[in-house]
Amino acid sequence: MAKATIPRRPDRPNPQAAVIWLTGLSGSGKSTLAARVAEELRRRGDDVEILDGDAVRDVFPTGFSRQERNEHIRRMGFVAGLLNRHGIWVICSFISPYRESREFARRQATRFLEIYLATPMAECERRDPKGLYARARRGEIRQFTGVDDPYEPPENPELVLDTSRMTPDEAAARIVALALEEGDKTL
């Protein structure tokens, strides 16, 4: 990926930093892309944090009702916004199935880029390393997004990617290019 040269003052937070919110079904590639985007931003010398759905739930367990999911995403949006205001890139990889909580997260950030991974359900199920879709279809898991709980696609995301049609490196490059291009406009 090409490196942008952004003049920075060491005593000032990075004004280009944004919250990059990756949303999509389980298996759409959110965690994979979060790691690759973070790696590229760190290579540029930027401060980056990843808030990943599975990792966060290990520390802060929560339920899966609509109310519990909304509260969880609101909390993570608040945390992401705090970090972002200090010039840190925050890459969030959450299913975040409901528009209302994603909109709350957007309002918390200085810069917010919603990236919708519009990967088809069949591909997400094919990729599923934990067998969660199969368990949900057998009724062993309830309130599983896309099976018996809705996913509300973003209405106006900054970027839509179908990760079944590109490699993870290609998808990450598109995200980084958007983040840096949009960031240049705010400097």
Image (spheres, helix red, strand yellow):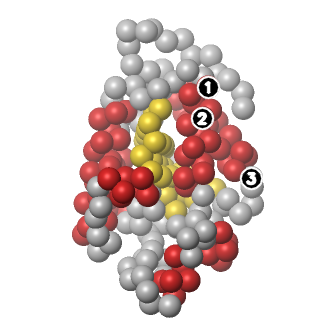
Q: CA distance from mark 2 to mark 3?
A: 16 Å
Kind of residue at badge 1? Arg
42 lies left or right of 96 = right
Query: Which label sits on residue 167?
Result: 3
- Counting from the top left corner in percent of width and height, residue 61 is at 29, 61
Residue at the spot of label 2: 39
Q: Is residue 158 above or below residue 111?
A: below
**Residues under numbered marks 1 and 2 in contact, where contact means CB atoms less than 8 Å apart:** yes
- Counting from the top left corner in percent of width and height, residue 71 is at 25, 60
Which residue sits furthest bottom? 138
- N-terminal of the pair, mark 2 or mark 3, is 2
Kind of residue at badge 2? Glu
Residue at horizontal 73 percent and vertical 46 percent from the top:
170
- Counting from the top left corner in percent of width and height, residue 69 is at 31, 65
Q: Secondary structure at mark 1?
A: helix
42 lies left or right of 64 = right
Residue at the spot of label 1: 43
25 lies left or right of 164 = left
Residue at horizontal 55 percent and vertical 20 percent from the top:
45
Residue 182 found in image quarter: top right
- Counting from the top left corner in percent of width and height, residue 120 is at 64, 71
Kind of residue at badge 3? Thr
Nearer the observer, 179 or 64: 64
Q: CA distance from mark 3 to mark 1?
A: 20 Å
Q: Is residue 169 visible?
A: yes
Q: Is residue 18 above or below residue 124?
A: above
